[in-house]
Image: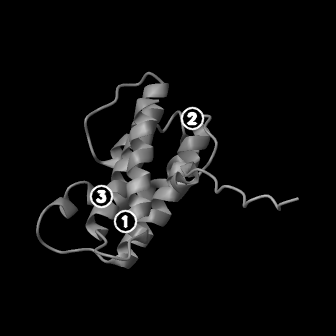
Amino acid sequence: ADWVAKAEGDFATLERECRARSRPNYDGACFHAQQCAEKYLKARLASTELPTPKVHNLTALLDRLRSEEPLWEVYRADLAFLSVFAVSVRYPGDSLGRNDALDALRRCRRFREAARLSLGLRARNASSRRRPRRAGRKAAK
């Protein structure tokens, strides 16, 4: 549950940065996409009682889950793409743009849905945690 809570925090930050109109942090969005996927992989590892290594390489984590989640192989390319953002975006150099962040969001969202399903959690968007709007006033009698 702790891994999932942390992953959902990263996913919420990812979505927020992708929606930002003022001063978006696309490097940060891509970093949080990688972090979300990493934490879901580690949550799945923890659920199987397999060791949870302190690594950021998502495909290495996927390899550890091969016998438990053979169908997750379809996410290998997405996880490899996201793995790059574990370290590179935290330091000066090339900056990422909106299209990079939206691509990271799309790839992360696909894997997140599969991970949540595997963990017995219902699919949802981080933004769905908002409180519903209140109904308008009742008409006066």
Measuring from the top left, give residue 17's x and y in whole percent.
Answer: 37, 65
Is residue 123 found left or right of 87 in the rendered image?
A: right
| Separation (CA) of disc 3 from disc 2 | 23 Å
Residue type at mark 1: give it. Glu
Residue beneath disc 1: 17
- N-terminal of the pair, mark 3 or mark 2, is 3
Quarter holding the C terminus is bottom right
Residue 117 sits in quarter: top right
The residue located at (49%, 65%) in the rendering is 106
Local packing at callout 1 (Cα closer than 10 Å; few below 14, some 14-19, many 20+) is many
Query: Label 3 belongs to which residue?
Result: 31
Mark 1 vs 3: CB contact within 8 A: no
The local secondary structure at tag 3 comes to helix
Circle 1: element type = helix
Taking the spot 11% from the left edge, 68% from the top edge, the residue there is 92
Residue 95, given in percent of the width and then of the height, sits at 21, 74
Q: Which residue is mark 2?
A: 119
